[in-house]
Amino acid sequence: MMCGIVGYTGPRGMETILLVGLERLSYRGYDSSGIATIYNGELSTWKKPGKIRELEATLKNFTIKGHVGIGHTRWATHGEPNELNAHPHLGNEGKVAAVHNGIIENYTHIKQKLSEKGHIFRSVSDSEVIPHLIETYLNGSLESAVEKTVKELEGSFAIAVISESDPDKIVVYRKGSPLIIGVGKGENFISSDVNALMPHTKEVIYLDDDEMAIISKENVIIKKSGNIVQKKVNHISWDAAQAEKSGYDHYMLKEIHEQATVSRQIIAKSISKQNKVGFKHVESSMTYLEKVNRFIIQACGTSWHSGLVGKYWLEQYARIPTEVDISSEFRYRHMISRENEIIIALSQSGETADTLACIREAKSKFFNVLSFVNSKGSTMDRESDGVIYTHSGPEIGVASTKNYIAQLISLYLFTIFIGRLKGTLSEEKADKMIQSVKKIPEYIDSILGNTDAIKTIADKYYLSREFVFIGRGVNYPTALEGALKLKEISYIHATGYPAGELKHGPIALIDAKLPVVCIAPQSDTYNKMIANIEEVKARKGKTIIIATEGDTQIQSLADDIIYIPSFCHDLTPILSVIPLQLFAYYIAIKLDCDVDQPRNLAKSVTVE
Ligand code: AGP
């Protein structure tokens, strides 16, 4: 299961806390949802397939009583999205309710064993075995029943449990999937991420793996292997308003329009008044950064794309050999740990299971790990040797936009930092690169001032059933990212290729029906791009070209053209991706797709 968990214990009404919390988590998974509460010692549950609003509609004329409750919004891994498979799941006697995020790998064995004892299972979900197993141990406290249960579970899980036997408590356990406690006054909260806690408290406790918490409205006890552990209460810096839509139709559009502000924030935090690049949380990593002779970047999806761009920069300016791999592939390569190599993980959520698994595997092989994360307090933040925050603020839209820009700027600044540290980048060149970075916000603003032209082009092509994106060098990853944005929110098939690869097969796709998006700003491979675009035109392909302002030569090859400001070629991936984000957004809107919560997806992929 990959989804969102909320819980509350305190004097306030359940629906305002649990339903609002689920709504704020719905970007994590949204194919069904449910809540459970205990009132006068009796457990009640409500579950509905579909979006949270289906559950809200069911409860509209209903006041949920009770002062202990849990809730869940689901992204299905086992079993289709329906009421039976929705969480919370109940034990055999209906006295225990549990919600789960993760995967129980040995659930069939447990289900078989309990079925032989007469347990009746209502769903095909792996999660349902949890409350059933807890009930079998419920002769003591709920806490001890959970403790015994998790010992039998294999896989990754964050669970929250309530029971008629302990009607004032929520017991939670974390093993591989995030779980956070919100500390209130006379009330306490739990959530899969801070976004659901924001309206109520900024004081949070991040549970670590194999930690259990016993939560009542008055206190929180945290245990590990049966012993009480003291945990730091963290204060969250950003506020709930930042996670709202602020008047935009969708989070994605808001986040696209935040990109200039985000770039200003990163510049302000990473470039000193003396024009030096610095990162607060890498001091502990300095010794190995000074000696590094190879980077291995590993990430997923959009974060992998920013890693591909980072490779070009790190090799060109810091002169450090850099590999880039997709996390789900990297973790099954037979990593060869060589001295002075550093694994870089890139992740917005800091919870992506495949990327996190690579970090753990790398650390077991004594690699040093430096992570670029956006979510402070995330598992990757806490398990990496060094961390660079990408400071893009809460990114709610499932399609990553502002954090992609944030990753790119952070990687470019890191390139300057490491190049200066290693002495492979002259101060003069570094100063020039920093000056270019400082121009990014104004250039982003100018692109965002011209969205109508992009919308017009999107309206022209929205019925096309497939697209090809091509780019070269640092804009080859831009082609991949543009294709990913389009396919994940409009469900139109799109593929990105290195432009030079067209003639090795993909050119067979080109015909008068196929739009080809060509990322062709001025660069040292511009003439090669022109040749590739001519190959497309020769086969009657439609060309939508991203070009540098003032480039009239390329106009004759374009069916449609979108200009970006003339800029140093290295940084064009930061500018050229913005029209592609908007292109995807406007096509998806035209097709009436659910832009912020595309089908089958979730914001944070916390399952492998
Ligand atoms: C990007 O638009 C997608 N939502 C997805 O590819 C995402 O980038 C990927 O799942 C990695 O997420 P992370 O950055 O949180 O690790």
Image (cartoon, rainbow, N blue to C red):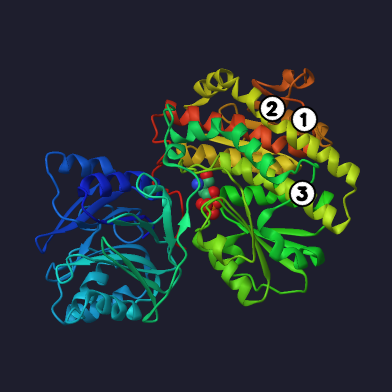
Asked if labels 2 and 1 touch by Cβ distance under 8 angstroms, the answer is yes
Say what secondary structure mark 3 lies in.
helix
Q: Nearer the viewer, mark 1 or mark 2?
A: 2
Front residue (pair 202, 596): 202
Could you tell me which residue is drawn at 63 percent across and 35 percent down?
577
The type of residue carrying mark 1 is: Phe
Earlier residue among tags 1 and 3: 3
Front residue (pair 276, 251): 276
Q: Mark 3 sits on what residue?
A: 312
Q: Mark 2 sits on what residue?
A: 443
Earlier residue among tags 3 and 2: 3
Q: Which percent across, then down, holds residue 266?
A: 65, 42
Q: Is residue 498 visible?
A: no
The type of residue carrying mark 3 is: Tyr
Could you tell me which residue is drawn at 72 percent across and 30 percent down?
533
Disc 2 crowd, CA 10 A, few/some/many (<14, 14-19, 20+):
some
Q: Quadrant of residue 35?
A: bottom left
Q: Nearer the viewer, mark 1 or mark 3?
A: 1
The type of residue carrying mark 2 is: Tyr
**Above or below: residue 552 compared with residue 331:** above
Label for residue 567? 1
Say what secondary structure mark 1 lies in.
loop
Label for residue 335? none
Earlier residue among tags 1 and 2: 2
Front residue (pair 513, 91): 91
